[in-house]
Image: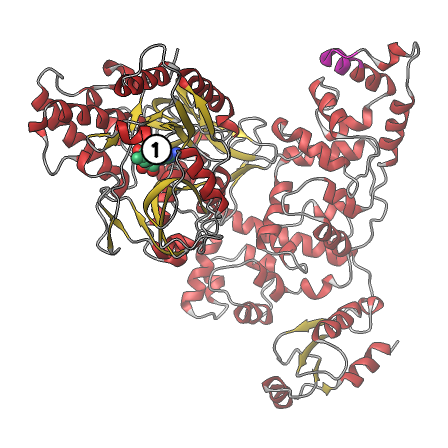
Amino acid sequence: MQSDLFSSDERAGKNSAGPDAADWKVRAEWLRTELNRHSHAYYVLDNPTIPDAEYDKLFRELVDLEQAHPELASADSPTRRVGGQPLPEFAPVRHAVLMLSIRTETDTTSGGAIAFDARVRRELGLDADAPPVEYAAELKFDGLAINLRYENGILVQAATRGDGATGEDVTQNIRTIRQIPLRLTNCSAPVLEVRGEVYIRRDDFERMNERQREKGEKTFVNPRNAAAGAVRQLDPAVAAQRPLSFFAYGLGDVQGWRIPDTHSGTLDALEKIGVPVNAERRVVQGADGLVEFHAHVAAIRDALPFDIDGVVYKVNSFALQRRLGFLSREPRWAVAHKYPAQEQMTIVRDIDVQVGRTGKLTPVAKLEPVFVGGVTVTNATLHNEDETRRKDVRVGDTVIVRRAGDVIPEVVAVVLEKRPADAGQPFDMFRHLQGKCPVCGSHIHREEGEADWRCTGGLVCGAQRRQAIAHFAGRRMMDIEGLGDRYIDSLVEFGYVNALADLYRLTVADLLAMKRRAEERDGVIPETVQKGKIATKWAENLIDGIEASKRPTLARLLFALGIRHIGESTAKTLADWLGQLELIRRAPAPLLRLLPDIGGAVAESIADFFAEPKNQKALDELLRAGVVPTDEHAPSAKLRNLLQPQELLGALAIPKLTETRAAQLAAKGVSLAALANADRTAIDAYGLPSEIGTALAGWLDAPANREQLRALQEMQADLLKLMPEQAGSEGVLAGKTLVLTGTLPTLTRDQATEKIEAAGGKVAGSVSRKTSYVVAGEEAGSKLAKAQELGVPIIDEAGLLKLLEEK
Ligand code: IVH
């Protein structure tokens, strides 16, 4: 049985209960106020206060009351206005044929279909033994109703429903929907109005919200809201970016087009002239056919690529439709039959944080169990910290939960008016987790400009283990032959491998036992038993593969560690320049940032990975297990240029300390060590402009910054010690800085740079007294003039090539 929160007034609270239905005048007034308030919150504030199903229920109650007591009818009743007044910005469109709505059957069991068929038979005066009525059964799309007017086969106007009589001209926006034909195929009828629903597919909707989240912007509550917003978007360029789709379900005004005799025939005819019509439609006989269709659609509902609001049954014959007619603006020949709602209200009991396979931390609301979209939901994703704060979800809050299709249930909004006095604090990921990953205890980190917090314990975190091992074993990493996902899963599941180093302790016996347990788990007869002998070859091969992986290049080993942002080429750069794992694993971020193609975020990510002691320990264990990089070497002499004090000072990103100022400090002989110990008097003695001195002093107030200076200074000293003695031994241009200007006759700028760097030189962007050479080509400009002024030697391409050839 469905546990619909709203079927009981007591559980739904006084807001949806209201005054006693016996006093219908007061009740109707209350319903109007409530409905107006909710629809204002929904359409204007985009901040729903109740689930749609609950709104529909109150709306239906008011319609019924007004029908039973016509004297209640008032011009301002929400029942007079479906979908909102035309906006002043859109031109009003008077519909040639009213756009009506259909009655909703809220009984979500088969009873709904049976009741409709019984009503139709009664209205048609059919005897019990008369043959079954033929129906067209189709989906009820969850979007926005649109009237498309084609004249002589050309789309001339598109309008929303508005109040049914007058809608809004949204032609511009609708034209951006690629599925809607701007010209009909083989149809030049003077007037053909096609009616249907504009909607957004679920995958498009998820992508759209993902983009919003990445931009740190507000997400859309559901596909229908997003579709309605897009259609009524005043800027057609913005509307064009919204992924809208369309299905036709009927006709409006028609002149000069032969209308088929049945509804199903009409949809077939529309399809033939190029109008999108959904394939999930059937012609069925009697109540049994309707019940079967309802059940069929319930079964495929989650697999549909878009949300539906239920199914629609229509008497198929237009002649019978005319006989049945209308009852207060609703056709007697059609009904919408619903399914359990995809949105419900419930209470947040707690907020947990889940760790994903890549270390991403996702806040999850633990809910009072609630029946949504056909299943009982106890968890709903809150996506990330920003979104949780934007929606301001707190423990104790009443929230609207949505579950549609295979999409993970999510909290779409908080019902603020139900927030208890003792509700929790606004969500704060760091405080909530006290800075530690809930699975492995490693420190958590959120990069600047990123929406997600992450666990930094890539090598040790249980949540990331399978992914980490699979990456480690990959072909371009440690290249462990034979270690596929299936074995990794079993090795982890049965506890043979908890850390990377465990791989190197595996024995043939372990692998055979692992396989046996996996086969037992899957209930398959072990191959080994089938053949009457124990197959061990695969296990021996795998052990050989693991053994062979113990001698990787340094770059492969670095790539294999799965450090965020470290791909193959960054790993190569690190290995080339620093040469040794011992240096790389303790390199401070500012030093890494100086290496080619390593930006701030990448440098931070590497330093952050190695700042986690658990990762360091896991790496030590790997080395102890016998993994040795084969190609370690002394740090590259190319580093010498980068280790100059002005470069290092510049890389520290000290506020206000520009490159020029850093150079100025360095020229004064201020070393990293001196700076690490400098007090205000010492800083003042550097002779910097006072605001820069103050900024520097402020930066040095943070002990972590002084620490970083010391680490950088130690690293600098060690690297200089380890580097080859003779700077020149690495290349003829070692220690030289060149500036390129103008167009060279044969070399591109990149090629020249490459040659200079390969010879140990550095290419700078501007000329100074320190510049060794300016290489000038055609149309050299101000740099050439500057070189002449400073007396820097000027050479041409031939001169450069000659320099490069020198021994
Ligand atoms: S028929 C006179 N068929 O549901 C009958 N409507 O309240 C006109 N809808 O505004 C509607 N799918 O936007 C019809 N297959 C379908 C539908 C459908 C969705 C929407 C439509 C209309 C509302 C009916």
Q: Position of residue 534 (x, y in %)?
A: 91, 13
Residue 754 horizontal side relative to residue 249, left or right: right
Ligand 1: which quarter? top left
Is 344 part of what is drawn in magenta?
no
| Residue 240, quarter of picture | bottom left
Q: Position of residue 363 (x, y in %)?
A: 46, 31
Quarter of the figure that contains the N terminus = top left
* Residue segment shown in magenta: 516-524
Compare residues 583 and 483 and report the one nearer the observer.
483
Q: Main secondary structure of the magenta part?
A: helix
Q: Position of residue 212 (x, y in %)?
A: 44, 46
Compare residues 336 and 117 and report the one nearer the observer.
117
Label 1 crowd bin: few (<14), some (14–19), many (20+), radius 10 Å:
some
Q: Residue at x 67, y 78 (%)?
A: 739
Q: Residue at x 66, y 83 (%)?
A: 742
Compare residues 358 and 799 and report the one nearer the observer.
358
Q: Residue at x 53, y 29 (%)?
A: 303
Is 521 part of what is drawn in magenta?
yes
In the image, is residue 148 above or below residue 763?
A: above
- The three-letter code of the residue at mark 1 reads Phe
Considering the numbered disc 1 on the image, is that residue within a helix, a strand or a loop? Answer: helix
Compare residues 357 and 154 and report the one nearer the observer.
154
Q: Position of residue 546 (x, y in %)?
A: 84, 31
Q: Can you identify the residue that label 1 sits on?
A: 318
Q: In this figure, what is the number of numbered marks?
A: 1
Residue 383 appears anywhere in the view: yes
